[in-house]
């Protein structure tokens, strides 16, 4: 009932807020709100994304961003962030979670909570609960939640690189992934009032079948869109060949997965350039695995140890857009979104466990589960105003976001040490009520017709976390000693300065200095779990300082039609870098922990720096042949200890040679990576370099208008290779419940993809 009342209140408040922003809401409907421009009062530049024309968004108009459109997503068979890093974005990587280590997205060596993910300007939180380590971590660890979206529902993916919080807010120490979902205009062609696209395909990497359909209809000034996606697959292939139970296994654990996505939008254009709309979205990903790597013949019955890992994200938003029908008003463009969003991760296991470590003894049920959830009400948006002062042309952007969130977590347990062991549950992290506020302002100042512009900007961020007691947290074994932790709050100003020079019509030069900011996560501050049998505890650090960064970028963009390219040099400096630590019980008085207990916690590192270069280029020839390539290299080091940052990926490049005609095309592409830098530690795996070849082809038969057939073979020569940052902590000299032989972590061998797309 409480949740139902909350949803009702959300809809009522949102409707009032949007109507307050649109004084002409009840005016007679008028024609399209397309803006006009004049010589001296041009409106905000637009970015063309497929067939959709939109105002330059949060990151779409900065030289530090790159975009992958919906057409490119479909044509390059991009079905995951990992695919994105192997096709259009070599500096982006995605690491699958594994026992004892979190996964997630990486940009320039930064990952996890240091990468911001936004969908329609709404932040997707990064949830991570790693209090359970050792053999329990494959079943009760939480991570990867920021990957809770379906690429088939998107109109574009923008990747913002660099240590810059000014545009997307706290968390963007390494960059941001900015997603835009489909709008009716993406599907409705010129001169039509309806349109759609449907796609179905097969991916051999996980033997998955996927289908999606999106349809839009316009009736006078009202447009409606519906999109649905479905994917069913299995475990991701590797090059392992040992199919046994236990720590020697190298084949992947058998897995069944199901992913669904639903997106609904309604948009209504009003007189005077106003548009209001409603968006509803639901994403779900469920994975069920046989945990064969954990079966040793003495603790769990073979074939009866199963794990699950489920992700669900829901949101409802009321959206307001404004584009001035003529110049001279206070605002030339505006966009606001009032939203409710809930992200939930649920992982765990169920098994049959033997008594006394004997497979002939009595067995009993063994269940573990971990539920982590963050729900939020929020408002996000901004405005654009353009005007002149003498010979200076100004484009002022004002905006921000306000977010009220609730965080809760619960670990459940049935059985464990005996057939009569009672059910139990506890929270490893207290419930937290919190607020996040961010406000930004920037002014793009163009100096007449000189081609030179300066963009100073400033962002203010504030957070406030308030832990709350609950019966689940008071049942925590560490509550009696540590009690309920104190709340925490903080503020930060993050300035930036971007300079750009349009040297010629084709060549743009740019340089930027910016600052970034990330407050500690709830997990880093308030985790509290003790395993007396395992001999360890995981304890948050409420005294952590917020991470800060400075980013320096210099580069050039070139686009002459048949030849284009971009080069960027960067250097980032980070302070108060949050990292995990290990210490022993002598740090805690009163003998609360038994002697010899290992305490895992978090602490701030003083200085970390990364530097690198990114290059991309494309050349199209008149005969239909094209050549494109891209590369990314990042170097990272802890300046205090002198250690290299192993979350930084080695040098990587993608080179493609293709041929296209109007109705068909082929491409041969190579993906090349250098070896992981040798850290001189025999107990960490330094992945070797590799080179793999991919071949793709497409055909659009003239007999079937709007149809496109695609096929590809990937890793043609069946090369064994590893994702270097995904295996950086693997010990090749030993095996355990969280450390299989290195072949277990290898990437897929030769695989195939086929798909058919129909536009209508």
Image (cartoon, helix red, strand yellow):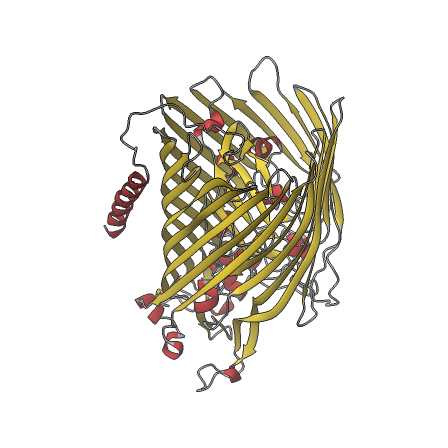
Q: Is residue 100 above or below residue 212?
A: below
Q: Can residue 348 be spotted in the picture? A: yes
Question: Residue at the location (58% across, 41% down)?
Answer: 206
Q: Position of residue 526 (x, y in %)?
A: 43, 68
Give the side of residue 580 with respect to residue 646, left or right.
left
Q: How many marks?
A: 0
Q: Residue furthest top?
A: 703
User: Dividing the picture into quarters, in which one does residue 635 lie?
Assistant: bottom right
Q: Can residue 240 be spotted in the picture? A: no
Of 72 and 596, nearer the camera is: 72
Q: Residue furthest front?
A: 390
Q: Position of residue 546 (x, y in %)?
A: 51, 66
Of 589 and 120, nearer the camera is: 120
Q: Position of residue 297 (x, y in %)?
A: 55, 61
Question: Residue at the location (53% across, 40% down)?
Answer: 233
Q: Is residue 428 above or below residue 115?
A: below
Q: Is residue 697 above or below residue 543?
A: above
Q: Is residue 550 above or below residue 86?
A: below
User: Dividing the picture into quarters, in which one does residue 90 lie?
Assistant: top right
Give the side of residue 452 with respect to residue 384, left or right.
right
Question: Residue at the location (55% across, 58% down)?
Answer: 516
Of 324 and 598, nearer the camera is: 324
Q: Position of residue 473 (x, y in %)?
A: 35, 68
């Amino acid at each position: 009932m409480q949740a139902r009342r909350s949803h009702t209140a959300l809809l009522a408040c949102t409707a009032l807020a949007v109507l307050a922003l649109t004084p002409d809401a009840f005016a007679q409907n008028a024609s399209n709100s397309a803006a006009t421009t004049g010589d001296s009062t041009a409106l905000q530049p637009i970015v063309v994304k497929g067939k959709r024309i939109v105002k330059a968004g949060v990151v779409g108009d900065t030289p530090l961003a790159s975009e992958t459109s919906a057409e490119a997503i479909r044509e390059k068979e991009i079905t995951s962030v990992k695919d994105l890093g192997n096709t259009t974005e070599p500096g982006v990587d995605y690491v699958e979670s594994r026992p004892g280590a979190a996964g997630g997205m990486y940009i320039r060596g930064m990952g996890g909570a240091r990468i911001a993910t936004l969908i329609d300007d709404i932040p997707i939180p990064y949830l991570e609960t790693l209090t359970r380590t050792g053999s329990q971590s494959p079943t009760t660890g939480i991570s990867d939640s920021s990957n809770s979206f379906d690429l088939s529902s998107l109109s574009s993916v923008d990747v913002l690189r660099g240590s810059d919080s000014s545009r997307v807010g706290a968390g963007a120490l390494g960059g941001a992934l900015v997603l835009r979902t489909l709008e009716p205009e993406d599907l409705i062609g010129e001169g039509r009032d309806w349109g759609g696209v449907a796609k179905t395909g097969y991916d051999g990497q996980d033997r998955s079948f996927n289908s999606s359909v999106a349809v839009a209809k316009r009736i006078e000034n009202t447009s409606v869109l519906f999109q649905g996606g479905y994917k069913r697959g299995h475990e991701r292939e590797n090059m392992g060949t040992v199919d046994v139970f236990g720590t020697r296994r190298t084949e992947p654990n058998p897995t069944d997965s199901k992913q669904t996505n639903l997106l609904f939008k309604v948009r209504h254009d009003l007189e005077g350039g106003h548009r209001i709309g409603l968006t509803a979205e639901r994403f779900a990903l469920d994975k069920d695995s046989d945990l064969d790597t954990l079966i040793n013949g003495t603790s769990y019955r073979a074939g009866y140890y199963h794990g699950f890992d489920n992700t669900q994200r829901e949101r409802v938003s009321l959206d307001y857009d404004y584009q001035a029908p003529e110049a001279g008003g206070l605002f030339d463009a505006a966009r606001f979104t009032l939203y409710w969003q809930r992200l939930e991760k649920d992982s765990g296991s169920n098994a049959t466990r033997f008594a006394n470590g004997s497979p002939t003894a009595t067995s009993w049920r063994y269940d573990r589960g971990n539920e982590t959830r963050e729900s939020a009400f929020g408002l996000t948006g901004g405005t654009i105003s353009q005007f002149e002062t003498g010979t200076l042309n100004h484009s002022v952007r004002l905006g921000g976001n306000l977010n009220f969130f609730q965080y809760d977590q619960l670990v459940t347990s049935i059985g464990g040490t005996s057939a009569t062991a009672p059910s139990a549950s506890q929270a490893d992290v207290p419930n937290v009520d919190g607020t996040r506020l961010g406000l930004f302002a920037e002014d793009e100042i163009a100096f007449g017709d000189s081609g030179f512009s300066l963009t100073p900007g400033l962002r203010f961020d504030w957070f406030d976390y308030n832990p709350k007691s609950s019966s689940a947290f008071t049942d925590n074994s560490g509550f009696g000693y540590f009690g309920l932790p104190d709340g925490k709050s903080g503020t930060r100003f993050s300035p930036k300065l971007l300079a750009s020079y349009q040297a010629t019509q084709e060549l743009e030069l740019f340089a930027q200095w910016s600052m970034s900011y990330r407050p500690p996560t709830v997990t880093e501050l308030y985790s509290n779990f003790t395993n007396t049998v395992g001999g360890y505890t995981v304890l948050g650090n409420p005294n952590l300082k917020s991470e800060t960064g400075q980013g320096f970028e210099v580069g050039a963009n070139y686009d002459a039609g048949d030849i284009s390219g971009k080069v960027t040099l960067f250097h980032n400096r980070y302070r108060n870098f949050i990292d995990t630590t290990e210490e022993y019980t002598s740090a805690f008085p009163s003998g609360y922990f038994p002697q010899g207990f290992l305490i895992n916690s978090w602490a701030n590192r003083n200085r970390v720096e990364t530097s690198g270069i990114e290059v991309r280029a494309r050349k199209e020839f008149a005969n239909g042949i094209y050549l494109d390539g891209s590369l990314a290299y990042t170097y990272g080091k802890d300046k205090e200890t002198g250690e290299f940052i192993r979350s930084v990926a080695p040098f990587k490049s993608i080179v493609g040679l293709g041929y296209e005609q109007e109705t068909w095309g082929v491409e041969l592409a190579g993906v090349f990576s250098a070896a992981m830098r040798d850290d001189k530690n025999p107990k960490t795996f330094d992945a070797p370099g590799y080179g793999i070849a991919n071949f793709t082809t497409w055909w659009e038969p003239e007999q079937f208008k709007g149809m496109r057939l695609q096929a590809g073979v990937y890793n043609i020569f069946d090369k064994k290779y590893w994702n270097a940052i995904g295996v950086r902590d693997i010990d090749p000299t030993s095996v355990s419940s969280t450390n299989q032989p290195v072949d277990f972590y290898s990437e897929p061998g030769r695989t195939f993809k086929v798909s058919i797309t129909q536009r209508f």
